[in-house]
Amino acid sequence: MSCLASRVAIVLAVCGLAAAPALAAQDCEGRLGTSRVMEVDPTGGLQVGTKHFPQTLDLADKEVVLTFDDGPLPGTTPTVLKALARECVRATFFLVGRNAAAHPDLVRRAIAEGHTVGHHSMTHPMTLADMPFDKAVADIDRGLRADDKAAYGVAGARPPVPFFRFPGFGSSPALLDYLKGRGIGVFGADLWASDWNPMTPDEQLKLVMTRLDHAGRGIILFHDTRSQTVKMLPAFLAALKEKGYRVVHVVPPPARSAAVPQ
């Protein structure tokens, strides 16, 4: 395979396209599974997640999108990936660039296992909105390049997966316009596990399920860097299955994901 073809295959894999046969080959009977794949076009100023924006993804009742922020980290991310694989579930990971650069093997593992890899800035400042505009943009762009270099070995002008989440949801109109101009969609969340606060796995499970039962659907925010989340995740996935929730996997449209970094 040529270098160019190899890059195309890798970028296709990040959206689960090249990885689809591998997932289909797994024995997912009796598991929670991934009910469907939703293509999300990031262009035109995509901004979703009602904790941050007025609108969210077009999800049916009891459909959820699982997202994990701040990784990857060797002590926790592999266990999260293992728990998701055990239930045939695909999620979206919003990477911190310095972590991706330090642990490219984990970035590539997430992609190989069919997950979507988005972006969460280079250094995770709290918040980008409180920084001078040029410094905030530089932190965003460095994160995009670091993530893509870790994932694909090359970083181009536009990320193959143009999904971004602001650290602490700290956006500004100017930064939102900047990302819109680059064709990068912004993800907030509809509910979160509050796993930045210390609590037991059982307390966290009760909290997030209470919130989810109230909301009925939505984009859920976790952190794959938090040990309490790692310990809670198998029970959470079991609770989703028991209560009839369905997992939706978000990807960019194939035409856009097939673009090769220059």
Image (cartoon, rainbow, N blue to C red):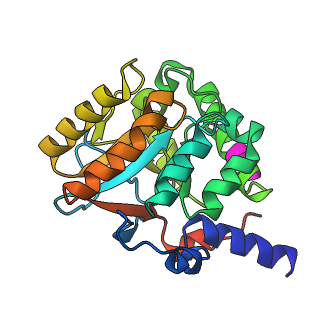
Position of the N terminus, as image quadrant, is bottom right
- 106 left or right of 25 in image: right
Find residue 35 and report its horizontal and vertical position in percent: 33, 69
Instruction: Identify the magenta region.
Output: 145-149
The image quadrant that residue 247 belongs to is bottom left
Find residue 216 and report its horizontal and vertical position in percent: 16, 50
Nearer to us in this view, 15 or 157: 15
- 250 left or right of 220 in image: right
- 16 left or right of 156 in image: left
Residue at the spot 70% in from the left edge and 75% down from the top edge: 9
Find residue 130 and report its horizontal and vertical position in percent: 49, 18
Position of the C terminus, as image quadrant, is bottom right
Nearer to us in this view, 136 or 89: 89
The image quadrant that residue 119 belongs to is top right
- Identify the residue at the far right of this view: 2
Dominant SS of magenta comes to helix
The vertical placement of 127 against 67, above or below, is above
Residue 158 at least partly seen: no
The vertical placement of 160 against 13, above or below, is above
Residue 62 magenta-drawn? no
